[in-house]
Image (cartoon, grey):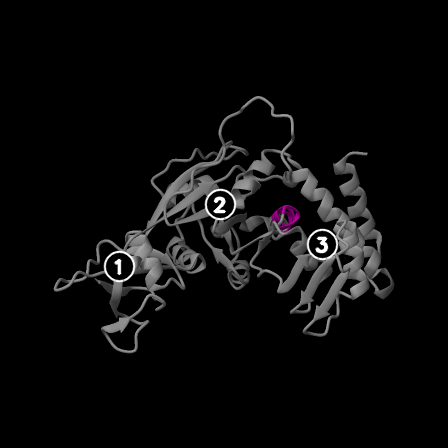
Amino acid sequence: MGILEKIAEIEKEISRTQKNKATEYHLGLLKAKLAKYRAQLLEPSKSAGAKGEGFDVMKSGDARVALIGFPSVGKSTFLSLMTSTESESASYEFTTLTCIPGVIEYKGANIQLLDLPGIIEGAAQGKGRGRQVIAVARTADVVIMMLDATKGDVQRELLEKELESVGIRLNRTKPNIYFKPKKGGGLSYNSTVPLTHCSEKLVQLILHEYKIFNAEVLFREDSTPDEFIDVIVGNRVYMPCLYVYNKVDQISMEEVDRLARRPHSVVISCGMKLNLDYLLETLWEYLALICIYTKKRGERPDFNDAIIMRRGASVEHVCHRIHRTLASQFKYALVWGTSTKYSPQRVGLTHIMEHEDVIQIVKK
């Protein structure tokens, strides 16, 4: 029996098993087996075949956004509208067959946008070019999931299931579980909160499935068996996702209103160029980027050339971005902006910068 057959068998058994107190150990074990087989499926095959056309694109710019969706939802049209890149678009499916990069220039930042080929059902098992598409999506900072507003919620559910099965967790944070395998001493199990989903016996059974018999486990939140398996496997990617509903000009206002009110959702129309500005603003928030302007002594700030950093960046990060030796020669910095109590404020390397702050660095 091949891996795909084993996965299908386990999925059938999970759907057949009624969820109650008596079956939670059985379900936990099945989920652990399922995660193990899926990990094997995603490992590259040992036999290197003939080299095909290159697929991945070198990371460039200040952030990377992956554009994924089913065929013919308007991804290529969106790329052409947002960037100066022309991606072939037509009314038939699978117009895009490889990864097409473009650059969105917004607030002085260069955001790399990757138009990935349409994902089809079964992509995680390697159907279409699903495995390669998903591998590129894992390297992005934000995923834009392009959906057809006329198709209801079917596309969203199928795409989430495909991404979930390859370890991409959308709009979720990493489980707060401490896990460390040891050489000996058996299982050390503890929790700082009451647990309703996991027990010591279940944790032990899941670990045994992965041939781990000695480990330290500390639950700092009430996590599910799925989240514990994610921590053991360790290669999960947690990333923000924007659900973008295209073709809203073809549905009723009530339906547009319903979709727009859903969390992490934006409604647009590429055909009529509706709401694209709001989408860019929302994308900027999800990427958590900030602009920082520099100033020389006795001169006005340079507002034409911003330094683009991630939210939470310190003065030290700014120094490293300007020049790698600057932090070692740093004496102090003067900062104007919302991160200070008064302007200018004299700060050290650990001061956290905010959007549109102005900085003047004084060397020793």
Looking at the image, the residue that sits furthest to the left is 298
Question: What SS does tag 3 mark?
Answer: loop
Question: Circle 2: is it few (<14), some (14-19), or many (20+) Cα within 10 Å?
Answer: many
Question: What SS does tag 2 mark?
Answer: strand
Highlighted magenta segment, given as a residue range: 157-166
Tag nearer the camera, 2 or 3: 3
Q: Earlier in the sequence, mark 2 or mark 1?
A: 2
- Residue 14's label in the rendered image is none
The span from disc 2 to disc 3 (Cα, nearest Å) is 43 Å
Q: Is residue 278 above or below residue 193?
A: above
Query: Quarter of the image containing the C terminus?
Result: bottom left
Tell me the amino acid under the disc marked 2: Leu
Residue 261 place in picture, x, y as percent: 52, 64
Q: Is residue 8 above or below residue 25?
A: above
Q: Specify whether residue 159 is painted magenta.
A: yes
Question: Circle 1: is it few (<14), some (14-19), or many (20+) Cα within 10 Å?
Answer: few
Can residue 123 be seen in this snapshot? yes
Tell me the amino acid under the disc marked 3: Lys
Question: Mark 1 = which residue?
Answer: 329
Q: Earlier in the sequence, mark 2 or mark 3?
A: 2
Q: Are marks 2 and 1 in contact (CB under 8 Å)?
A: no
Tell me the amino acid under the disc marked 1: Gln
- Residue 67's label in the rendered image is 2
Give whichever of 279, 98 is nearer the camera: 98
Question: Mark 3 = which residue?
Answer: 183
Residue 303 place in picture, x, y as percent: 21, 58
Residue drawn 84% across and 64% down?
20
Residue drawn 43% across and 41% down?
77
The span from disc 3 to disc 1 (Cα, nearest Å) is 45 Å
Residue 109 place in picture, x, y as percent: 33, 52
Q: Earlier in the sequence, mark 3 or mark 1?
A: 3
Q: Specify whether residue 37 is painted magenta.
A: no
